[in-house]
Amino acid sequence: MNTRIHPALIAFATLTFIFLIGPLIIIIGTALSDTTFLTFPPQGLSMRWFANIFEISAFKTTMVTSFTLAILGTLLSLTIGVPAAYALARYRIELPKFLANLFVLPILVPEIVLGFSLLKSVATGAGASIWVSLLIGHALLVLPYCVRVVGASLNSFDFSVEEAAISLGCPRWKAFFTIVLPNIRAGVIAAFILAFITSINDVSVSIFLTGPGISTLPIQLLAHMEQFFDPTIAAVSVLLMGVTVAVMAVVEWTLGLTFLTK
Amino acid sequence: MKPRLQAWLLAFPATLFVGVCLGWPVLSTLATTFGEEAGPFATYVKFFTSAFRVTVLTRTFEIAVITTAISVVIGFATAWVVARAPGRMKSILIIASVFPLLTSVVVRSFAWLVILGKNGILNKALLFIGVTDEPLSMLYTEGSVIVAMVYLFVPLMILTLVGVLEGIPRDLTEAAASLGATPAAAFRQVVFPMAVPGLIVGAVLVFTGSFTSYATPQLLGGDRQMMMGTFLYQRAMVIFDWVGASTIAAVMVVVTLTTVLLMSRLARKLNPVVG
Amino acid sequence: MTVSLTIDNVSAQYGSTRVLEDLSLKVAEGELVSLLGASGCGKTTTLRAVAGFLQPTAGTIRLGDRDITHVPAHARNIGLVFQTYALFPHLSTLDNVAFGLRQRGVAKAERHKRAHEMIERVGLKGFADRYPGNLSGGQRQRVALARALVIEPPLLMFDEPLSNLDAKLRIDMRVEIRRMQRAGGTTALYVTHDQEEAFSISDRVAIMNQGRIMQLDVPEVLYSRPANAFVADFVGFVNMIPMQAGGEDDKGTIAKMQGGASLHLSKADFTVPGKDFVLATRPEGLSVALEGDGIPAQLGLRTYLGRAYQYRCTTAAGEVIANGPLSEPLEPGTNVVLVPQPDQCCLLPAES
């Protein structure tokens, strides 16, 4: 194919990618600096700021909170989202059309409005605990991914296969777990990954719901930044980039990275 | 069991969850704004007559529009190169776009604090070259917010548009060439018009994302460049003015929903492809 | 305006895979030549090279006297009909058809007039404002044809244009394509994998394999006189019986077969191409007889074809398929001889 691209465009794209990746490299550099202030290029190389993360108990506990929350929120969302996606795909004519859109609402409502509203009605109004409020908020936040991504693989699933299993004497519920689920595995994995990363990176919802004693890592990072401006922040940032790398590696192993352009 | 009942049973938990945990709180937030003693629209009158509030709204709008415009231009040009890059290079470029996208907004905004700060890298570089004699204050300006926002949203734009451009069959550009269209004419008359609906979808994502963002204006704009997101947070969590905060929330919902509806209608209109 | 197309010793490759090997082909003025072959044989690659979407590594391509080998695709002035039709989904039928005229700077009123005329000629009057998404497969095909014809190209090319249509429409459309091409006297290159389509529409057909033309001739010759085993197999010569010339007597050349049997090939009917050769026939080229000068065989499974019985026969050279008359059905296990019918058999040189 004639794929001649104008050199000026190539130069432009190169600059774009320097712009995209450069700042992240700078963070890695500052995290490695031996100084007590943020500087780049690093002066002296040291891992002391990484060690410092684990000295500060707030980072340790919020890290645990963030992971627990991301996993529980995603699982909760999948538990209610997968049956809904299944119902939407399997019984297309039985359910009203608006229902499919209902599950996408959490994306349409600005996150910060969602966070504030949950604080007002669920945390304060209904008196839910911080943990429960956070769990609800994160499950809502990721529900659209669960319903849409799982729904996409269900839409390309041939339900006559399930009917074949039932005609062979397999009970309905068992047919779902032994026939349908293995065939939409990629969709469920993709939904889990997208939901997990969305949850773990969330700021706008969590900022309203975290409270004394319970916080998430991004919120703790924001709070820390306002008081101290030291390389610990950079070190935590590198750690979070590590999470991204891990997630991308999981995507590559399970689905292949081409999944990400779809 | 009847299919309809089965369907509803399966969809019920999620429906209930969205209804109770999203519908009720958000509607009650919106309802709060109409419950003032001074009259149902008092809080909106207050909002739109306060010079400060209107400034925040227009600033947010302005920053979101500029961010969207810059992201569209950078995103389109870059996506064009990515979409036509040879196999292996393309994967690398896509990874390079996905990586920032999946990295925390706090981390990505923090990077610009380090770069644009008084003792930041950019100032050091400028001092070194001799462009300036004393460090410039670049933080807490509209510019610093826009730079960081563009940084936030360009990957999203690139990935959306790579998908769009790759979705345009090669046959079409070849057909255009066989009919005598120069590469430039084929781009103008075939590729670009076909990419526009996707471009609009991407632009809406960037616009609503930047219009409602919190962490980036918080870190790079501070109180001086208050945007709707940071303003809402301040009203709710610092001043505890929940009616005021609800009003801001309502304005944000109206602006984003209107944008989404208008733009998706526009995208559909520009895309007469049926079936 | 009509010109010839000359492809001279063209080679091409994708990456390191060679897809065209020193290919030469001349399409005369007003002639329709088909490139026929299985997928991956190089037929579409040849078309893409002529269209300018693929740069040959060697050789030249000429339209009339004009060397277009290095002319960019958009300046070649070749009408092209794609397998997928490649209609612009964002443009109406009218704008699709007028697209090429617009590139040529034809004023709006004039190009709309000409596009409307062409739309009418392909039988789509009243569909000018429809978008491709709202047209049926056959209608899209007509728009694609109109779009390629309206620029009045000296050369028309078709890339499997009918493969996405149902059987009946396919036959209608190929008649239509042939009629329009004849009417304009336009030179045409037509790519297909469908033998019947190629034979019915073309002046000449090139059967391709592995980037080479195996045989180029009029359909009648290809059908009855294949030049080599590949073409014979391609056009349905299911029986390929290896033989060896072993002297001659008054009844003709003595052809020896595996297993020691032999038969006579009369000099009037057969030209033996060398010492080792292959007798190639369709089932109807071997008639089943109880005795005579032929290939000894034992009958196997019998199937009824309506006009004849067909037998799977076991011979010393392997399984052979032959037809026998309806008047005397024979039972499996019967020992017979299969007599080659001169007008339906070919002797091909053996390939090493």
Image (spheres, rainbow, N blue to C red):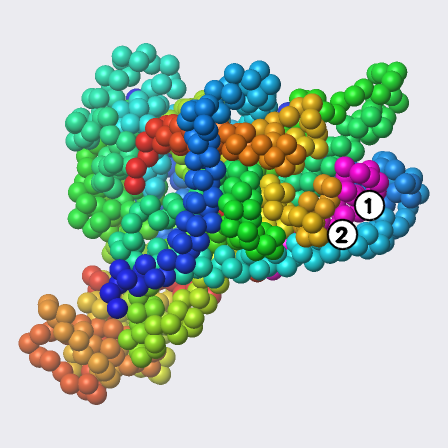
Disc number for residue A137: none
Farthest-out residue, left: C327
Measured as percent of width and height from the top left, residue B152 is found at 63, 35
Viewed as shown, does residue C45 lie left or right of A28? left
- Quickly name the residue at label 1: A232
N-term-proximal mark, 2 vs 1: 2
Q: Can the viewer see residue C20 in this picture?
A: no
Q: Residue at x 17, y 48 (%)?
A: C168
In which quadrant of the rendered view does residue C202 lie? top left
- Quickly name the residue at label 2: A59
Q: Is residue C40 above or below residue C177?
A: below
Q: Amino acid at mark 2?
A: Phe
Q: Is residue A42 above or below residue A180?
A: above
Viewed as shown, does residue A238 lie left or right of B36? right
Distance (Cα) linking label 2 and label 1: 10 Å
Q: Secondary structure at mark 1?
A: helix
Residue placed most toward the observer, B176 or B271: B271
Q: Is residue A141 above or below residue B136?
A: below
Residue placed most toward the observer, B23 or B8: B23
Disc 1 chain ID: A
Quadrant occupied by the C terminus of chain B: top left
In which quadrant of the rendered view does residue B81 lie? top right
Q: Residue at x 30, y 58 (%)?
A: A91
Please state the extent of the stretch shown in magenta in the rendering.
A224-253
Residue placed most toward the observer, C236 or C303: C303
Disc 2 chain ID: A
